Image (cartoon, helix red, strand yellow):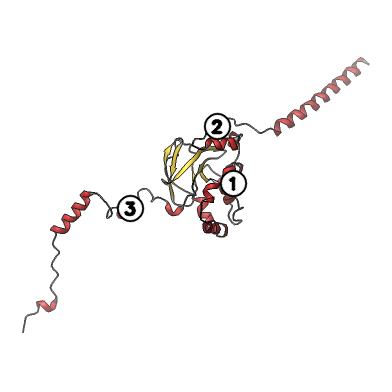
Amino acid sequence: MKTRTSKAMGAALGVAAIALSVPLAVNASAEPSTPTVEVPDPQGPDCGAFKEALPNWKGLANLPVSAALASIPEASTFNSAISGQLNPAVNITGVLDNGPYVVFAPTNEAFAALPPEQLEILRTDPAALTTLVYYHAFLGLLGPDDVKGQRPTQEGTEVEVTGSGGDIQVNATTEVVCGGITAQNAKIYLVDKVLNPAEAPAPIGSTSTSTTETPTTGSAEASTSATSVTETTEPAAPAPSPAAEAPVG
């Protein structure tokens, strides 16, 4: 009898232990996972507002870039542009999620500053929207101290990134307001203007750049040299025509 009783008690304790462990396991899986590595702080003048709007910003490091962008309140318009919400024919989230990418995400204010007719074109012209959103991404996983340089975008033309840390510009006129936001496969840079592919810098090493810049050089030496050549060089005499060479009869 003692043996059966002890076995029964053992079984009951085992069931109780399992019952206690199940809620703990469920609770653990329901909690948001924390990054396994330290997530660097983003940098830029508006990063304080970014962190305030998204207190769990470090958790973006566990999300693919499309999900991370969908979680950032200030990037909701850009998120709609890349996910088929602005134009159902354009959804590049699958491409971006196959990064690594650096993604420049214009703020909602940046999109609101576009002329209404341009926004209408983006809503109705898939080719125009595709060109625009691909111009906002290039391959790489670069933080604020390393992102500078001229980079070929997914659209095909280039962007020029200057500065570092919390003071970064894109194509000279666009400011990064909060940069280096870490996603699972990307670095996100919130920018204060929508980038325009028509304003892309010429490719590095392009011969057309030197050809077009040479005639427009504004230095005094170049102007003096050009004047000197014009004044001292006499035009070659035209070749005599056959009629002029013929003997007079």
- Where residue 121 appears, as percent x and y from the top left, is 54, 59
Looking at marks 2 and 1 on the same chain, the residue that comes earlier in the sequence is marked by 2
- Where residue 104 appears, as percent x and y from the top left, is 50, 45
The numbered disc on residue 229 is: none
Mark 3 touching mark 2, by CB under 8 A? no
Q: Residue drawn 42% across and 52% down?
A: 199
Q: Distance between the residues labelled 3 and 2?
A: 42 Å
Element type where label 2 sits in the image: loop
> How packed is label 1: few (under 14 Cα within 10 Å), some, or many (20 or more)?
some
Q: Quadrant of the image for the N terminus?
A: top right
- Where residue 109 appears, as percent x and y from the top left, is 53, 47
Residue type at the position of mark 2: Val
Mark 1 touching mark 3, by CB under 8 A? no
The answer to whether 119 appears left or right of 16 in the picture is left
The numbered disc on residue 39 is: 2
Q: Quadrant of the image for the C terminus?
A: bottom left
Residue type at the position of mark 1: Ser
Q: Looking at the picture, does residue 227 appear above or below residue 97?
A: below
Q: Looking at the picture, does residue 29 appear above or below residue 226?
A: above
Q: Which residue lies furthest to the bottom in this view?
A: 249
Q: Residue furthest right?
A: 1
- Where residue 194 appears, as percent x and y from the top left, is 49, 49
The numbered disc on residue 76 is: 1
Residue type at the position of mark 3: Thr
Instruction: Decide which of 30, 123 is in the foreground and name it.
Output: 123
Q: How far apart are marks 1 and 3 (CA)?
A: 40 Å
Please give the residue where the numbered disc 3 appears in the rendered image. 207
